[in-house]
Amino acid sequence: MSEDPPRSEAPPRPSSLIHTVYGEFVRRLGGWISIADLIALMAELDVDAPAVRSAISRLKKAGTLLQERRDGAGTGYRLAPAMGPVFEEGDRRIFHSLEPAALADGWVVAVFSVPESERAHRHKLRSRLSWLGFGNAAPGVWLAPARLLPDARRLLERLGLDAYVHLFLSAEYAGFTDLRTAVADWWDFPAIEAQYAAFTDAWRPAAARPRDPAGVDPAEAFRAYVPMLTQWRRLPYLDPGLPEPLLPADWNAVAARAVFTDLHALLAGPSLRHVEQITAQESR
């Protein structure tokens, strides 16, 4: 049985694939991997050694990875301590926030005002709140389902932007426009649905293919799982999990989530075993 990933015109960037490998596997294996191991794994994803080294350099500059040499294993890279909370937050969003919020749960509202002399912070606030899944109700006013409050607090504090923002919890919408109509203005539903459709079109054939879970080859699983997870992990941030009554009638997130859940259950375990096998071979 083959689980080779589908080809697309815009494959994931090497740095995005490496981010996925660290977040899903390297963290579970101590947080460090040799550059030789990483190059071997990335070669299976059609990324050559120069591209790996270039991506690693960028991740070092961004503070994501730290270089570390280990006796008997050579030079490698480990996750910076600050990345722990980032990946833990990602786990919650990617794997555990698949169901829509309840309308009765209410909303978190973020209100910010940034002086003109610090306009760079204003742009960063807008981009990061959007990245978290907040919708823009008015200039300087953003909102999301209430369950995103902890993530918003952690992100704003981590980026040093908390001094510019006031956060409120609101139980319900009190008027005047129909809430479903207003929500359609605050979030770009067509753009989110386009992302879900692209994911489903790419991966539904693999999810629908008959197979025996016990017969999944670890190397084939890895080659499919890493690109699939890399494409998927953006979506839980674009889509905050709005309550179902506020969504379009033909909201296509349901089909995409089913594809992801199926492939994650099938491929995650064998993929981890493959990484363990590669790192064990390279360390001997």
Image (spheres, rainbow, N blue to C red):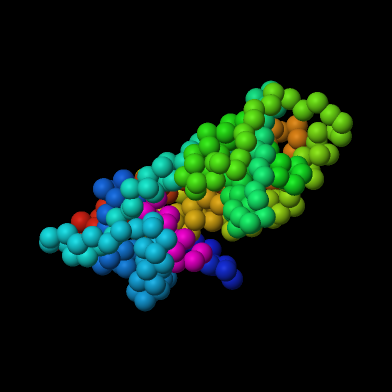
The image quarter containing residue 67 is bottom left
Query: Could you say where residue 34 lies in the image, as x and y percent from the top left?
Result: 25, 62
The quadrant the C terminus occupies is: bottom left
Residue 60's image quarter? bottom left
Q: Is residue 266 left or right of residue 198?
A: left
Query: Which residue is at a point 19% across and 62% down the rendered structure image?
Result: 69
Residue 154 vs residue 276, the one in the foreground: 154
Task: Tell me the magenta residue range.
Answer: 12-23
Q: Position of residue 212 (x, y in %)?
A: 42, 46
Q: Is residue 283 above or below residue 157?
A: below
Residue 234 spot, x, y in % from top left: 56, 52
Residue 203, can we see it? Answer: yes
Q: Residue at x 57, y 69 (%)?
A: 10
Residue at image coords 44%, 46%: 86
Q: Nearer the viewer, residue 250 or 244?
A: 244
Q: Is residue 283 above or below residue 269?
A: below
Please indicate whether residue 266 sits to the left or right of residue 128 in the image.
left
Magenta stretch encompasses residue 245? no
- Examine the residues drawn in magenta and state their main secondary structure: helix
Say left or right for 222 vs 94: left
Q: Quadrant of the N terminus?
A: bottom left
